[in-house]
Amino acid sequence: MRSTLALLALLGVLATPAGAQDEAAVPTAAEPGGERAAGDRDVYAGVFLHDVADVEIEDGVFHVDFELWAKWRGELDPQQLMVANAADIERIPLGRASDRDWHVERWRVRGTLRGEFPMHAFPYDQQSVAVVLELPEEHGRLVVDAAGSGMAERFSLTDWGYEPEFHLGSEEHTVASDLGFLSREGLPTTVRRARFEVRLVRPLLTVALKIFLPLAIIALVALIALFLPAEAIEPRAGVGVTALLSCFAFQFTLEGSLPAVSYLTLTDVLFLIAYVVSTAALVVSIVSHTLDRRGRVRTALWTDRAARLVLPAAGAVAVAFAIPRVPEREVRGPDPAPTWEVPTSARDTLRIGSNRVDSVLSAVVYPGVFWNLVQDVDQDGADEPVLVARRPGIDNELLRFAADGTLTATWPLREDTRWSDGEPLTSADVRFGHALWESDHVTAVDTPDPETVVYHWDGRLAAALDSPEATPHHHLGDLFEVEGRDAVLDRLRHSRTPSLGPYRLAEVTPGERFRVEPNPHFVGPAPAIAEVHELHYEAGDLVRAFLDGEIDITIPNGITMEEALAVRETHPESVHIRPSAAYLFLEPDLSVAPYDRLPVRRALLQAIDREALARDTYGEAGRVAHTPIPGLVPPGAVRTAFDPEAARATLRAEGVGEVTLIAGGSVMDQLIAGRIRAAFEAVGLRVVQEEVPSTFRASREGGHEGLLAHVIRGDREASPGRYWNLPFVDGNYAYDHRHDAYTDEVHALVERERHALYPERREQLRDALFALVSERLPVLPLVFAAERILASPELQGWDHGPLVRFGTGLDRWTFAE
């Protein structure tokens, strides 16, 4: 879950020594890409079916009344979205709504649609009516909007039974025509289709009473003749002929209400069986009478007795074979397991130098050891179902939406997946992971079998699409029951535990080294480098160890800027100085004056020359922060400029003469605090400066009654509460808390973001929230720190950019020849 990743990030900050805390390498997600081409746009189409009536099987049509909508980001002509199986419909526009570049268009559709109604199994036939939508692929990828789609509880169907739920499907269809598109003139066109299907069945009791019971009575009447004396040929023949005529009449009556088809239906077969039984009974009557007249009375008697057993038995067997078997429920198989290639390495051992080898959870080797059920194996931003057979999504049946607004997500595990100690991965491990990293919106976790996990959510939250956490229950379950969550976390931090990634922990010696080796039970290829050592050095020794060849790479920000610049003089190919996502800010205590007033916070930010702060502290790689996320500033963001005169005037008008500045005790902490203090004093403020052992703990505990200089990683995927200065209670942000920055209006937008199941919509809402952060200033954004790394030029594959957690893709790090 994203909350778990955020917690791990916080643990990484917590584990950082005072001297490096302001620049801790905490995991972060990659920044989203730019505008996509039209053909790469996802267009979400949904249907709410109000009514189905008049299923005319003989004509292959049915009447519908439904609402149709399309949601998309960017530009699209929504008229290109067509009802593919329309016969005669009226499409009434209901309006269009937009929120920046996110658009929704709705229609009411009434009329007749086409369908296929095979009658082979009548009256046991199962039919389906469907709304089929289509969109040429060059206008976008048509995606089923299962999140919003649904139907009324009852339709105007009196002779069919149905479950009020859609069976969804999608497919690509290529036609050998350009369909008149100039952009594809002379080329075939690919059309994507989405299918919203309702399955219909005939009521069994009605079928039995209307067809089977009368036909059975006719057959029994025909068999009654076998119990009459052989010499009574006239009543026996009369009974047989009457049964045959009744069959003819009954079939004629039924066929008047059935479509004319060129093949035999089940009803036709049953009538044929009745004809055969009735005819056979009549023939037996004639044979028995003939035998009786010739004096072979005993033979006639045994002929009747045999026919009394053989004919019903033969008829029953024939009926049993004729009635179709109930089709097994269609179960989609697992998605193909993702595959990826691992390059070869010229060396088998990698040595990483670090000044904080104290917790496995914040270690560089962590991403190579502990994998989620879904994983971004190529670091391209797309998670792959590595350990699950399929992933729930808004376009498949594994994500189910209830009428009361709740949601269930089913996660089927891949078969034969094992932990690094050889024990199988089961649903109990995923349920245990939830108990350890529980979310406040999961109401229950069911494990119907060892390979299936079902999460129940109290709302339609985007977090339901995030990968669950699996934790080895066989290894840590007893410890959890006896000593609780803190004991399990301590074990995870400081000892070897089974894992699911390409590496496994071979040695854990906190304060000295972590060593990992290939996981023999990993589902993918073996890692390129056979053994990785993460070694502890004091901060001042990392440069010496690198230059002496004891290590191959240093962790980000393990060395100072001065050390990096000095090494660059002699080994420029080994020094990497670049902008990072380390977000430095001042966290005001919004529960006390004067920090609870926006004009004061704005004036304090105006008093700081942030460009000079970034340049003087981090050199050319430092960046001014306007929002918590590095990169392009989202539309609507407020860029607060350096304006000491305006700051002085506002602070005087607000009656502010003194502020409290709180910082950590490291050299970098005090350097930055000194520059901020000088800026405040320059606008006439008296500054009371305090020092704390850990700014992380001070932020989490709250109530510091000042301005706390703190740093976190700017992560687009993190919980919104991370950037709104909200209290952190029982592992979750307290979204019910309010202050002058986090208002009901902001909370409503946060809730919309948390419930947005469409990736494009969620990205847009996040941008809106980041822009609001710059406007409401729950914290005072300062700068993004620079990142310094020493790396051997032969080491490749480690650099995924500063926005990706260092250590990601460890299994594909290699040494060049």
Image (tube, rainbow, N blue to C red):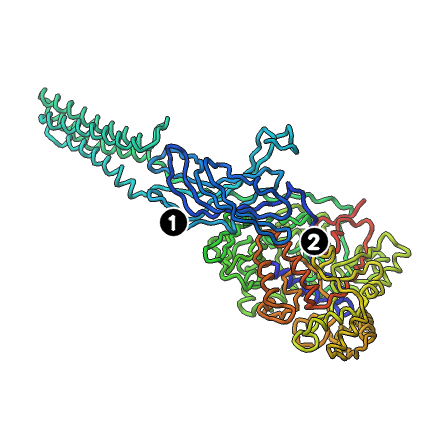
Q: Vertically, is 197 above or below 535? A: above
Label annotation for residue 345:
none
| Closer mark to the observer between disc 2 and disc 1 | 1
For the residue pair 1 and 367, the one nearer the viewer reads as: 1
Query: Which disc, if any, is residue 30?
Result: 2
In the depicted structure, whether residue 686 falls above or below residue 121: below
| Quarter residue 308 falls in | top left
- Residue 654 is situated, as x and y percent measured from the top left of the image, at 73, 77
* Residue 541 can be seen in this image: no
Structural crowding at the residue carrying mark 1, measured as other residues with C-alpha within 10 Å and reported as few (<14), some (14–19) or many (≥20): few
Q: Position of residue 422 (x, y in %)?
A: 58, 53
Disc 2 + disc 1, Cβ < 8 Å: no
Distance from the alpha carbon under mark 2 to that under mark 1: 47 Å
**Is disc 2 surrounded by few (<14), some (14 to 19) or many (20+) residues within 10 Å?**
some
Give the residue number, with chain letter if any, for mark 1: 154
Viewer can see residue 286: yes
| Closest to the observer, 609 or 578 | 609
**Total count of labels:** 2
Callout 2 amino acid: Ala
**In this view of the protein, which residue sits in the foreground, 574 or 350?**
574
